[in-house]
Structure formats: C-alpha cells, structure tokens
Image (cartoon, rainbow, N blue to C red):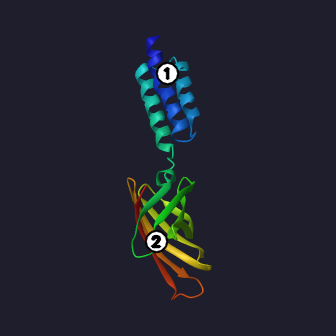
C-alpha cells in the first residue's frame, strides 16, 4: 500500500507543473499513467516503473515552453547608433513578440516604430517584416539577443517606395 503513494506524489507534481508552468499542456496524460500503473496487475513492478518513466519523459519533452514571455518587459538603456532610448517588448504568442521602439522627446517617451512579429528563440530574435515607420511603409530586418535581463536589438528599416531611404536602429538595455 505504501508503494502506491510513491507514484501519486510525482504524478500530481507533474500535473501541477504542466498546469502552471507549461500552460495546460498534456496534464491528462499523467492521469493515464497513474491509472495504468495501478490497474495493470499482471505487469511486474519494475516494468510498470520503467513504463511510467518513459511516458513521463515523453510527456515532459512534448511540453512547449512559452519562450516569448521571457523576452517581455520594458528595457531602458542608452541608444546605439540611432535614437532608440527605450524598448517595450510584449508577448503575442509562444514564439513571437511585439517590439515598440521609443525615443525620449521633451521628457516623454514616444513610439516611432513598432515591429509586430519578431520571432524569438531562447536567446535570439529575428525581425523580417513590413510595417509603418515615420508615416511611411518600411521593411524591417534585424536581429536581437537576450542575455539575462539585458537585450540587444539592431537592424534596419528600408522604405518600400525608396530603397535609398534606410533607417538604422541599435539598442542595448536592461529591464
């Protein structure tokens, strides 16, 4: 009877982790493992333990973390080669962020460009999209990195109707 409780605690902890950390992804499969462990009487204890470990490992590897939320926040810093003084990053889904490039004008921050769909990985950002900038339609391209609470974003915005009109942005800041 005591052995059964050794299975209950890890499976319940896994369900809690899936619900709160992985944003309800597959917590019900842990219940299947739990039920399978106690209903399959003809299978030996070592085999049941091995099957439970394999299933839990599969479940954990299939849970996808919300990477974009790691990037979200307000970053203040000193501009590089452009007039960007602050960057607001918001999560749009698990792998995309919205980036507002802001400048300090007369003591207040004003957004002069917004990148709608920056693609993120654990520590890298890729920008390749069209969007508005200073009243025109521009193509944004660039890269970024996240190292702890420090972000570095750089790239260019090229006017779609005048390819010689290229604006550069470069920002390094911290949360």
Q: Is residue 151 above or below residue 5?
A: below
Observer-nearest of 143 and 8: 143
Image quadrant in which the C terminus is located: bottom left
Tell me the residue that label 2 is attached to: 142
Whether residue 70 is situated above or below residue 155 in the rendered picture? above
Quick one: SS at disc 2?
A: strand
Q: Is mark 1 on a helix, strand or loop?
A: helix
Q: Can residue 113 be seen in this view?
A: no
Residue position for label 1: 8
What is the total number of numbered labels drawn onto the structure image?
2
Q: Nearer the viewer, mark 2 or mark 1?
A: 2
Q: Where is residue 165 in the image (x, y as percent from the top left)?
A: 52, 86
Residue 162: x percent and y percent?
Answer: 56, 88
Which mark identifies residue 122?
none
Q: Earlier in the sequence, mark 2 or mark 1?
A: 1
Residue 69 drawn at (x, y percent): 51, 51
Crowding at mark 2 (Cα within 10 Å: few <14, some 14-19, many 20+): some
Residue at 46 percent of width and 43 percent of height? 61
The CA span between labels 2 and 1 is: 48 Å
The correct choice, above or below, for 61 with respect to 39 in the image is: below
Seen at 56% across and 23% down, the residue is 35
171 or 157: nearer the viewer: 171
Q: Can I make out residue 87 in this image?
A: yes
- Residue 151 found in image quarter: bottom left
Q: Which residue is drawn at 57% across and 78% down?
A: 138
Residue sitting farthest toward the left = 147
Q: Taking 147 as reference, is 171 above or below it?
A: below
Q: Percent position (x, y) of residue 174?
A: 40, 58
Q: Residues within 10 Å of mark 1 (few under 14, many from 20)?
A: few
């Amino acid at each position: 009877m005591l052995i059964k409780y050794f299975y209950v605690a890890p499976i319940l902890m896994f369900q809690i982790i899936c619900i709160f950390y992985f944003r309800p992804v597959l917590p019900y499969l842990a219940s299947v493992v739990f039920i399978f462990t106690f209903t399959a009487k003809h299978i030996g204890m070592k085999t049941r333990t091995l099957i439970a470990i394999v299933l839990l490992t599969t479940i954990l590897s299939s849970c996808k973390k919300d990477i974009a939320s790691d990037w979200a926040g307000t970053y203040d810093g000193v501009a590089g080669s452009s007039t960007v003084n602050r960057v607001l990053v918001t999560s749009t889904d698990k792998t995309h962020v919205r980036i507002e490039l802001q400048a300090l004008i007369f003591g207040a921050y004003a957004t002069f460009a917004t990148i709608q769909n920056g693609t993120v990985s654990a520590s890298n950002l890729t920008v390749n999209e069209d969007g508005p900038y200073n009243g025109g339609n521009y193509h944004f391209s660039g890269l970024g990195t996240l190292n702890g609470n420090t972000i570095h974003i750089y790239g260019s915005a090229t006017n779609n109707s005048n390819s010689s009109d290229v604006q550069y942005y470069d920002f390094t800041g911290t949360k």
